[in-house]
Amino acid sequence: MKPAIRGSTLPSCGSSLSRPWLALPVAALVLVVSVGVAVTIGPADLALSEVGRSVATHLGFGGALGLEPLSALRDGMVWQLRMPRILTAAAVGAGLAVCGAVMQSLTRNPLADPYLLGLSSGASLGAVLVLLAGVPLLLPVAAFVGAVGALALALSLAGALGTITPTRTVLAGLAISQLCAAAVSFVIFWSAKGDAFREVLSWLMGSVASATWTSVAIAGGAVLVLGTLLALTGSVLDAFTFGDTAAAALGVPVNRARWILLIGVALLTGALVSQSGSIGFVGLILPHAVRLFTGARHRLLLPLSALAGASFLVWADTLARTVFEPRELPVGIVTAAIGAPVFAFLLWRGNHR
Amino acid sequence: MSAGYSSVRTPPTAQIASTHHGLAAERVSWDIDGRLILDDVSVLAPPGAVTGLLGPNGSGKSTLLRVLAGVQQAGQAASPSGPAAQPAPGPATTFDGADLRALPRRERARVLALVEQDAGTDLPLSVLDAVLLGRIPHRSLLAGDSDADRAAARTALVAAGAQELADREVGTLSGGERQRVHMARALAQQPRLILLDEPTNHLDIAAQLHAMRVLRDLAADGVTVVAALHDLNLAASTCDHLVLLDGGQVVAAGPVGEVLVPAVLEPVYGVRVDVLTHPRTGRPVLSFERS
């Protein structure tokens, strides 16, 4: 998730931190510690050292370090149950935060994120349809197609309403989002077996409860490849700060750049949603929180948003599975509980400028 | 060519040689949904001078600047007043002899900077960071700010008289301060041609004079300056050359004293104009009355 970063001795450049680049290693450390600690939390208590031993053994360092492997049961808890789930949460959180930051800059809309503009619901719809058809291998592809379709619909609906303004985009996105969510519910109930409502909830509110190492590979791989590529486009996104005309005057091919980046965002959203369902508010609030530290320029904002988003979703998911133990909440409820007030604050601040 | 009330003819397009120094735009036309916004407009702006672009609201000043900047492609609409049967030479916009539209975007952004009207952002951005955006055309898209970029940004801030704003946030600035920052951002591009869309709009008189002072200094450094202006007296006191647009056509072009005359201005603006002479500078001062 870290692009090649040079010039770690940059002076402050007027941003809020005296050494902004130090934030990256700090955020990376916070993420590693978060993942380690989150694995120890759950119905059966595990020690941090046990987590370390299990990871080292599976990575093949166990012998070299002279560590004793865990018992099969405890090792399974770390490596088969909790680790894939937590790493998937981290990858999804990182990816959604980057998507949100990119969309906010490209559309110059502080309210843009994959969830609000309908990409996540569209991706869920694509995923559910493919699962119903019984071809789970196509899951990420279908989710991508759903995300692109929803984005195209939302933007053309916003355009049909007149000039594309932030408010119109959000309204159009909400309409598309609700439509796709209703379609997801309908499709699942149509094919209902037993407790279909759980499945509906996990697609619409998001959940990483059933994550496996395959989920880690898909979500993590997408974040490493697409997230890194998106994070490298900082200068292009910077050029959009004062709008399309200013970007064009700075030598950016505005339309091409916008479409390539939006398709990258849709690809990444599709891959993430196919593993986690649509989780709201991560893409919306994390970039805003990170901007408070980094300012609006993207070279630091994008990687830092990714790291912060990863830690955020790891903890949100930990809350979701522990607060009402043994019941589990869809993680989207936790992110909404934190994110909705922040969203309201953004709306309020937007009106008071 | 433009028919109507021109007292100073626009130069015949065939004679605008590609060896012309400064900006030479020939026969620019532009329409939106079939409505002609610019009709066969030709403009010359010499280097080291401030050229003012005048005209009533909707006369096409902003569109012309955007087309010249290459952020809006010029179409070659069939000009109703032009010789329709004759195959016209393609519209060309050259700067120091080089076809601006043929330049790669980034290269063009190193030659030419555009200062828009009222460009704003909701994002938290420091003034220095905003000015550093002007360095984007000068560096690889993957690179961060180099020491040279920061030095150029500082120089631009000083030239625009905005150095004390460097650490402020753009969203907290007054209109005049924000205008200085936008000028500094354009200067950080180190352009040889700068196009400004009403740089004095909404500014108090001191800020207006400050902005025009910056433009004069740029011209003194050999930069070609083209500014769309509303205030005819400001244009009279600052500009070297004027181009007057009306209804998307060039009505008059030439030195200040030839364009700012009642016979040219009155039909365009629909007011009575008296031209006086400033007692100290000798430049024209205009007074208006309803006709």
Image: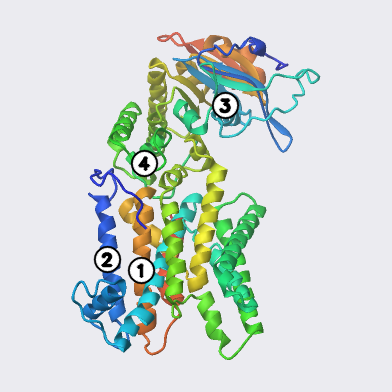
- Foreground: A134 or B269? A134
The amino acid pointed to by label 1 is: Phe
Q: Say whether disc 1 or disc 2 marks the residue closer to the N-terminus.
A: 2
Q: Badge 1 local density, few (<14 within 10 Å), some, or many (20+)? A: many
| Marks 3 and 1 belong to one chain | no
Q: Between label 1 and label 2, give the one nearer the viewer.
A: 2
Q: Residue B270, position in %: x, y?
A: 65, 23
| Marks 2 and 3 belong to one chain | no
The amino acid pointed to by label 3 is: Ala
Is residue A97 found left or right of A186 in the rendered image?
left
Q: Which residue is mark 2?
A: A30
Which chain letter goes with mark 3?
A: B
Q: Which residue is mark 1?
A: A312
Q: Are marks 1 and 2 in contact (CB under 8 Å)?
A: no
Helix, strand or loop at label 2? It is: helix
Helix, strand or loop at label 3? It is: helix
Q: Which residue is mark 4?
A: B143
Q: Say whether disc 4 or disc 3 marks the residue closer to the N-terminus.
A: 3
- Cα distance in 3D space between marks 1 and 4: 29 Å
Q: Between label 1 and label 4, give the one nearer the viewer.
A: 4
Helix, strand or loop at label 1? It is: helix
